[in-house]
Image: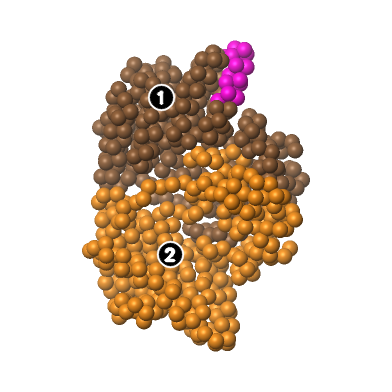
Chain colours: A orange, B brown
């Protein structure tokens, strides 16, 4: 959840031990905080989903554990308003450690399971955590609350206690298993520019209506990384077909808004068509050329990401 | 100078327009803050020194301009003590925006040119800048001064005024041109783990003695990124031969201490032998395979970085 301030896994991987496509064991990367000796093969391996080598050891950059921090909460009547609030926080230059969105479908599912009473109070919840040292965290949370109120929150405040903040983040963490209790969940993982978050959430709502399925939203919204969760009922094969069509529509909308088909989960098998659309033929061929160069025998996680040549 | 807090160029490049080795114009990367659609070809291009494509457009991630900040200064009698101070600041978890070292050779050269009077006061100067919001910068600078004093600084304090801080950073910036007034300068660019900075600086001193040349040091020392500057006199061909030998010894020492042959300047022609030593044959062959894949005709900055196959 803390990518919005701390970046992603790739930013923390300094070195790797890798078994290559030609059967050699090599060390890539470095142990220093900077370095430009040769190509960034470490960055190339991270996120390659095992298609360029088998990673057998990882050297990571460490950071000190941050303070617990201060949490700001905003309740909203619509995802549109929540999207506006996110844009306002980005424009104000706020740097929360986490900025998460949980929508009404998730709140209801969590309440149905754990009876936390959240869905009666809000349609959409935004949660922001600031973990800066000293008074900077308090100050960040105060300004975040101002942004929430400015965007039309029905209620917004800083958490008074650590327990209260933990309870809200617990609801966020429970959203996915709570939805899975209702039926099979197809998890999306699109990422759009921050300015397009509100529009993307609106389109997701229309997609749900059009295909007559439930699409819940949890989102690392400070990054524009949305996880629409397409929920159907067990054994409803027709709904599952409609969910796949909705899944494709969401990808098409994300691309149209300048986004990407995967913010963090990767391509695997399910997003190969989306990847092909996003990259286009010339860039896809560059990927295939790199793949052939480092896996000449085609033995590393074959068929994944790019599929057969 | 601010990599120690803000990271390097590669961390800020989101997208590229590139003319490929096969003559196509492609767009790589994305406009979103996160994304894992396919291989990180943007990261592969950045730092490839033009050997994988011709970059014609760059989309960068922006940050807000930080406050001017607060500067902490420490004077030391030896590079060893300054190295210990750097290790202490890293162990204390301090996150300055910049942490720079300037040694006696640089201070003397700057004084000989601009008469700033620094070389009479210190053998080595450490400069740290904190640009956090509000009182966090003051607090960081205060703790940095404590680290300097704990490591045996002869004098350490926070700058009282912005002008005073600017003057010290000006001396840092003038070091390179001041040395160039004395003769040809061969610039090193090694990076070692923070814990090895003191030992590396000591080895550089011994290398200078052994080869009877002047080696001045400026360093992005918070990253362990050192720029030993090998200064000879105009027309002294014998000294220039000794400087090249010293250059090679410094690279060997950096590698022995777990470092890299280039922290930020790259390989070009001069560091091809060092790169070969650092990578080893199997990893070098992976580089060549990627190069052949993306530049099948061998037309992109030929001979650079890896040299002829």
Is residue B285 left or right of B13 when viewed as pictured?
right
Q: Position of residue B104 (x, y in %)?
A: 41, 19
Is residue B242 a member of the stretch shown in magenta? yes
Within-10-Å neighbours for mark 2: few <14, some 14–19, many 20+:
many
> In the drawing, does residue B10 fall left or right of residue A114?
right
In depth, the one of A206 and B139 nearer the eye is: B139
Q: Which residues are magenta?
A: B234-250
Q: Quadrant of the C terminus of chain A?
A: bottom right
Q: Position of residue A145 (x, y in %)?
A: 28, 63
Q: Residue furthest left?
A: A160
Q: Is residue A175 magenta?
A: no
Residue beneath label 2, please?
A220
- Report, in whole angstroms, how far the alpha carbon at label 1 lies from the one at label 2: 46 Å
**Chain for disc number 2:** A
| In-image side of B223 versus A66 (left or right) | right
Is residue A258 at all visible to an observer of this figure? Answer: no
Measuring 48% from the left and 55% from the top, which residue is drawn there?
A: A8
Can residue B204 be seen by looking at this rendering? yes
x and y, in percent, of residue A130 in the image: 32, 57
Q: Quadrant of the N terminus of chain A?
A: bottom left
Q: Nearer the viewer, residue B283 or B6?
A: B283
Residue A176: quarter of image? bottom left
Percent x, y of residue A168: 32, 68
The secondary structure type at the circle numbered 1 is helix
């Amino acid at each position: 959840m803390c990518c919005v301030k701390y970046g992603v896994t790739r930013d923390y991987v300094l070195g790797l031990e890798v078994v290559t496509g030609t059967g050699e064991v090599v060390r890539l990367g470095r142990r220093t905080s900077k370095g430009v000796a040769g190509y960034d093969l470490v960055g190339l391996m991270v996120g390659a989903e095992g298609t360029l080598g088998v990673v057998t050891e990882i050297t990571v950059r460490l950071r000190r554990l941050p303070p617990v921090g201060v949490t700001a909460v905003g309740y909203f009547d619509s995802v549109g308003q929540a999207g506006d609030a996110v844009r306002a926080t980005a424009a104000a230059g706020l740097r929360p450690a986490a900025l998460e969105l949980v929508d009404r479908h998730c709140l209801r599912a969590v309440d149905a399971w754990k009876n936390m009473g959240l869905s009666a109070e809000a349609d959409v919840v935004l949660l922001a955590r600031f973990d800066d040292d000293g008074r900077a965290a308090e100050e960040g949370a105060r300004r975040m609350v101002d942004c929430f109120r400015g965007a039309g929150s029905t209620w917004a405040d800083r958490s008074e206690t650590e327990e209260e903040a933990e309870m809200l983040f617990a609801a966020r963490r429970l959203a996915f298993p709570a939805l899975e209790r209702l039926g099979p969940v197809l998890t999306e993982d699109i990422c759009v520019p921050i300015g397009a978050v509100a529009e993307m959430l609106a389109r997701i709502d229309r997609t749900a209506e059009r295909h007559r399925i439930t699409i819940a939203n949890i989102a690392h919204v400070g990054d524009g990384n949305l996880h629409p969760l397409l929920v159907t009922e067990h054994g409803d094969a027709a709904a599952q077909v409609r969910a796949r069509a909705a899944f494709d529509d969401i990808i098409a909308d994300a691309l149209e808004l300048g986004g990407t088909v995967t913010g963090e989960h990767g391509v695997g098998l399910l997003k190969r068509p989306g990847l092909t659309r996003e990259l286009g033929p010339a860039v896809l061929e560059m990927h295939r050329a790199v793949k052939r160069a480092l896996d000449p025998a085609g033995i590393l996680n074959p068929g994944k990401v790019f599929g057969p040549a």
